[in-house]
Image (cartoon, rainbow, N blue to C red):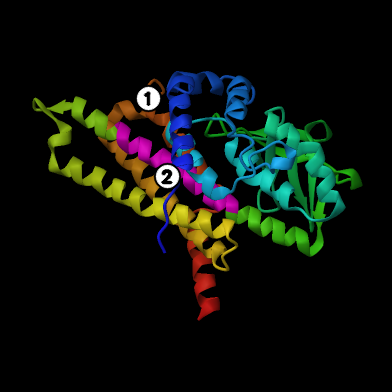
Amino acid sequence: MHFAFDEQQIAFRAQLRAFADKQCTPAHVRQAWDTPTGWSAARWAALADMGVVGLTVPTGHGGLGLGLVDLVLLLEEAGRAGLPEPILETVALAVPLLADAPGAPGAAQRDRWLPAVASGTAVAAVGTADTDVVPVAPGADLLVLQRGDEVHAVPAASVSLALRPALDGARRSAAVTWEPAPETLVVSGAAAHVALARLRDRAAVGSAALLVGVADHMIAMAAHYATERTQFGTPIGSFQAVKHHLADALVRVEFARPAVYRAAWSIDVDDPDAAMHASMAKALAADAAVLAARTALQVHGAIGYTWEHDLHLWMKRAWSLVPAWGDAAHHRAKVLEHMVARA
């Protein structure tokens, strides 16, 4: 099978990169970390105007009606730029779950929330039974939450948040106290289990795409610094050991990237092996990001540990996304389960 992104998908990525180069510099990211939410409402509105926020919202509710293949390049770019806005939680997770929910409860929640998301006036967070805290809950207008075999779309005004320490200032987390109600129900029973399984696969792929972008940027930062830092009057980038470390990290990223793209395609076309592909993508991307962070820190030396240097913004993003929705070991175990089941 030959797979390639089309011109529109590549152009959309270029548009987001141009936007981020101007509107999401490291200084902007630091400013966002000092806000109560960790991200910028103005930048979220600008992303909505570009169509990023409404990309997965069905056209009947004001969005573009596109899939994960269309989104995956933008998530990768968001990781590269360090965008703090909750694109993963809102666009990749909450919207598809609401859009695909069957029956009258799902239709009611779609009519209520999806137009608001598409217009940029609603931000969503997602919490399942797998997690004790909900990432990006502070600042969210909607929380998509699991309770047993039910999924509910709960307005922020109906929940109580207890903030938890967050390594990444853009991914503020909170324990959420809430009570299910008939008017917040999205889907229940067997259909809820299917919806949650698909959500976890999308979360694995979406976080993997972010990690690929984050890792790629850390390697670029390290490579650039290696041309500036000198020892014995020579740039350290000329040393064979440094070259090898950077090359090893880059190879990991280049192996992870196509696995992420394949998993996104598998989810969009309902491939029977989509869950396995999603786990493969997350495991490879997590490994790549961990190695990229370690290598970048080694190349930078002591300055890489400091708050003043920008490297920590991307390292903390990597370290927070690696365990999110299952770490590499978890997803390797899932791949093994799928392989054994097929044997």
Count neighbours of disc 1 (C-alpha within 10 A) and say few if under 14, some if 14 to 19, many if 20 or more.
few
Indicate the amino acid at tag 2: Val
Q: Which mark is residue 183?
A: none
Residues shaded magenta: 202-221
Q: Position of residue 260 (x, y in %)?
A: 46, 53
First along the sequence among labels 1 and 2: 2
Whether residue 156 is visible: yes
Q: Position of residue 263 (x, y in %)?
A: 50, 57
For marks 1 and 2, give the CA distance: 24 Å
Count neighbours of disc 2 (C-alpha within 10 A) and say few if under 14, some if 14 to 19, many if 20 or more.
many
Q: Which residue is mark 2?
A: 212
Residue farthest to the front, as pictured: 7
165 relative to 175 in the view: left or right: left
Q: Position of residue 62 (x, y in %)?
A: 71, 36
Circle 2 SS class? helix
Above/below status of 119 relative to 265: above
Query: Label 2 near label 1: C-beta < 8 Å?
Result: no
User: What residue is rendered at 20% in x and 25% in y?
Assistant: 228
Q: Is residue 204 magenta?
A: yes
Q: Which quadrant holds residue 144?
A: top right
Above/below status of 51 relative to 283: above
Q: Position of residue 283 (x, y in %)?
A: 46, 56
Q: Nearer the viewer, residue 84 or 174?
A: 84
Q: Which residue is mark 1?
A: 306
Main SS of the magenta part reads helix
